[in-house]
Image (cartoon, rainbow, N blue to C red):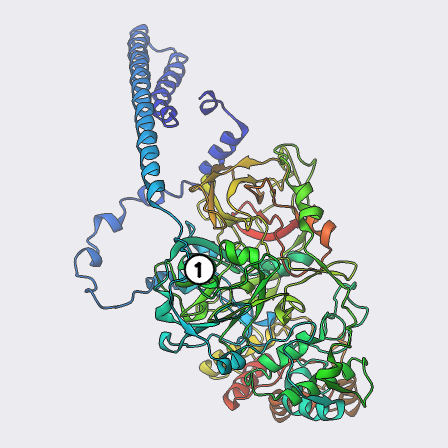
Amino acid sequence: MDETFKPSRRAFLRGSAAAAAGSVAGAAAANGADPLITELQDWASYTGAGVDETPYGMPISFESHVVRRNVEWLTASPISSINFTPIHALDGTITPQGCAFERHHSGAIELRKEDYRLMINGLVDRPLVFTYEDLERFPRENHVYFCECAANTGMEWAGAQLNGVQFTHGMIHNMEYTGVPLRTLLREAGADIALDKWVYVEGADASSNGRSIPMEKALDDVLVAFKANGEALRMEHGYPVRLVVPGWEGNMWVKWLRRVEVTDMAVESREETSKYTDVYADGTARKWTWVMDAKSVITTPSPQMPITHGPGPLVISGLAWSGHGQITRVDVSKDGGITWETARLGKQGDTKALTRFYLDTEWDGAPMLLQARAMDETGYVQPTKEQLRDQRGENAVYHNNCIQTWYVNAEGIAENVEVS
Amino acid sequence: MSKSPNIFIPALAGTAGILGVAFAVTSRDYGADKIRALETRMGQVEAQASAASEKASVEAQRAAELELKIAEVQAAASQRVASLTAPAPAVEGTYGIGRPALDEEVAAWDVDVLPDGRGLPAGGGDVFTGEEVFAEKCASCHGDFAEGVDNWPVLAGGFDTLADEDPVKTVGSYWPYLSTAWDYIHRSMPFGEAGTLTADETYAIVAYILYSNDLVDDNFELTRENFADFNMYNMDGFTVDDRPEQEYAAWRAEPCMENCKDEVQVTMRSVFLVDTPPEGGSDSVMNPASIDGLPSFTAAGPSFIPEAAPKPAPVVQKAAVTQPAAPDLMEAGEKVFKKCKACHQVGEGAKNRSGPHLNGLIGRTMGSVDGFAYSSVFAAALDEGRIWDEAALAEFLAKPKTYMKGTKMSFSGLKKDEDLAAITAYLKSYGE
């Protein structure tokens, strides 16, 4: 309590800066009464839109900039490409489907529920075919999980590259899924579920994007999902059925899931050998690096979200997540990692789901080097870029979960930087 | 509890204000009665502050009681919820949902090939046949020699580059299993016509890719029978995820909270600034800012507060317009130029990047921009004195690699005539 009254350099700076800049919030009042209040506004007089004018509602036009965006030069063709979730402009934890990032290997396909088939074969007693309707007859579960592309933040290995959290960290979304546990379907087919077995999963699209999953994971928390955030999956996320592989790299979350094959070894498909493997400085590579380690990033302020209100109360906010389970703590630094403060979690994080954090603070108007550092329930602490590079070099491409730095200047403008 | 300090602030700030006024007023030698009146007033204010403080402490106590009550209610609720939520039940036996998969259905979909060759169909193909099939079905993206066109994957070469700054990960240099290539090509290629290759065509293409990598002779034939004998160059290049031993063990430690470093400096600023136009997508432009002039940081804060920088000038300046074009054509041209922007700059201050600057392009001699390292085909054009006129530009941009065979420009070309007209008008506006 005493601290409230202690005069400090910070409070002094705040006071003088506010005096110099003029109080932003009070500007309208200082210049006289606010016409938005004293004058009758159209919207307070005329009637608005009737029900059913938009049978399926879209965000209001003022929010039309909050959209997925791609970076054209990253890939050869938008058909086999990626775009980025506008995480800078979202709050809370749930990603609306319409702005959740897309990653296609042969484009998003239109597959009707009526045309949907799921086959389970391989080392099973009863090779089976399910229709979409069949899947809805199995007991189902609801879980919130993050889905992060293994290449999220991949451009940043070699240095600060893209100025925007949407582009450095936007290959992620977080939805509430409804689906049937994969183990239920494996049991239905009488699968050999010995722990040295694998399931090979593939999609119905032209790429098929096959991946091998060890049986232990398949029996644990993998879901065959058909709803996200309460409604049908979007086409671009695998309508009508996708696989959800909690905490593991997004490439394994096979969309338009059409087949699950029980095998006695990993298939070593293209997506698990030539791609999604991590090349180290000595030229050797790690494979089967499935788990997405703990990571966090400040979404505001960030390059797309400058501070516009001047010195004074400031909410620093961001997202944290871990493929190993719950986020237990997030620390924030304003000086590039010299001093850390523990942030407040919006709510206790779900396991393998995004957690929102807030640092409710005072900005004195001086430049900052903002960083966030996540810890998960295993005690793992998100590493610095330097720690990661010491381990893996700069060519790994995938699985970059380093601490991100934003330089915020005295005008509140933020920029993606690297620090010593 | 956390709210209680806020309750004090207005009362005490009020006291401080009055005291301050009193002090200022006294020092100006007012009459004694004025001073007495102020002293009375001060006494009142102090009494009020003390009453406010008492009231706040009662309120704080009440808040604490409420918080306790809320915690009790929440605990009770979570107990009730816990007893009602449960994972989907597991049953003994099965539900009897679904139907048996027929053999021909399994055969149609189960086409994956394992590293030991299981799953391969009968058949084979040789390098010679593979070259023909590859030229017809693969080369438009991967190049005649599997060298890759534009951003499309390079399939050949790259040996001994994996430890380099930019490793070239090809089928030859990186892929650990031949089965992966066969499986992927047969299942997912050609791009846009997946699933149309016969088994023999697939064997032939894989044989040709091996040949392009100098891994087999030109008389090689790949068959189901000799498939498993083939060991890939990088088969031993992979280790299974060892992050638990290499990283987790060390990184599961209580982190430092203060004085974690002496000084922090910005060592690099974002290479690209990213514009996010209202119509969607993004435009990356080089960030001209340098790390000079940024403060360093210590526990005491930043070393200095930099002066506000002048707003950066937009990259594309329209000042150099010498021949105004129709505004909508200009606008269309600016849009088309987005395809070029990653490599070329135009306008005031335009510099050479991975492509030469394009100021005054129309009418300029080909290959003539100072300081740009042209490919030999442009060097030759310079020697011949060839000039960029509208016709040459249109022909070049329609099919760059055909018009200037050997150009380094990795751009497949503008297919629409209106795009060509627009980009020409746009570039003309930056001087002739």
Q: Are there few (<14), some (14-19), or many (20+) residues within 10 Å of tag 1?
A: many
Residue B67 visible in the current orientation: yes
Q: Residue at x 31, y 25 (%)?
A: B63
Left or right of B26 in this view: B206: right
Q: Amino acid at mark 1?
A: Thr
Q: Regarding mark 1 in the picture, which secondary structure is present there?
A: helix
Numbered label tally: 1
Left or right: where A56 falls relative to A332: left
Residue nearest the viewer, comparing B249 with A297: B249
| Image coords of residue B14 (percent x, y) | 34, 21
Q: Is residue B211 above or below residue A199?
A: below
Q: With respect to residue A20, does A53 lie above or below?
A: below
Res B379 quadrant in image: bottom right
Which of A199 and A388 lies nearest the eye of the viewer?
A: A199
* Residue B402 screen position, x and y as percent: 68, 91
- Residue bearing the label numbered 1: A184
Circle 1 chain: A
